[in-house]
Amino acid sequence: MWEGFSTTIVSALGSARGMALISVFAWICLALAAIGAVVGSRYGLVGILWGVGSRGCCSPVGGSVLAAFSFRQRFRSTARAAPY
């Protein structure tokens, strides 16, 4: 749920570059899960689950960083343009 929320913020407030970055980051996290599953397979099913679960920690954190950047970038530019 956390990953979905951060991805939604990036897609709603971010630029095309932000969307490309979140896509690249998602592929990196997927590769991390595959590597984690291979490494964890030495320890049986629990090792595979821990290896795949590493993606569950990596992806939301990276998405949140990109969401915070997109949020600040979007509202920084509109705050300067607002007439007072």
Image: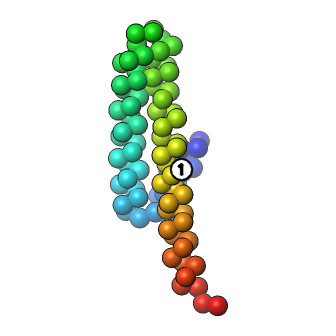
Residue 79 visible in the shown view: yes
Residue name at image x 45 percent, y 25 percent? 52
Residue name at image x 54 percent, y 78 percent? 78
Q: Quadrant of the N terminus?
A: top right
Locate residue 57, reporting x and y percent. Answer: 52, 35
Q: Quadrant of the C terminus?
A: bottom right
Locate residue 34, reporting x and y percent. Answer: 37, 26
Name the outermost residue toward the right: 84
Rendered view: 35 above or below 67: above
Rendered view: 76 above or below 40: below
* Element marked by disc 1: helix
Among the 4 quarters of the image, the one containing residue 36: top left
Rendered view: 47 above or below 11: above
What type is the residue that disc 1 sits on? Answer: Ser
Residue name at image x 60 percent, y 90 percent? 83
Residue 12 visible in the shown view: no
Rendered view: 33 above or below 64: above
Name the outermost residue toward the bottom: 84
Q: Residues within 10 Å of mark 1 (few under 14, many from 20)?
A: some
Looking at the picture, tell me which residue is in the foreground, 55 or 4.
55
Locate residue 47, reporting x and y percent. Answer: 47, 15
Among the 4 quarters of the image, the one containing residue 2: top right
Locate residue 44, reporting x and y percent. Answer: 45, 8
Colour scheme employed for the rendering of this structure = rainbow
Q: Which residue is mark 1?
A: 64
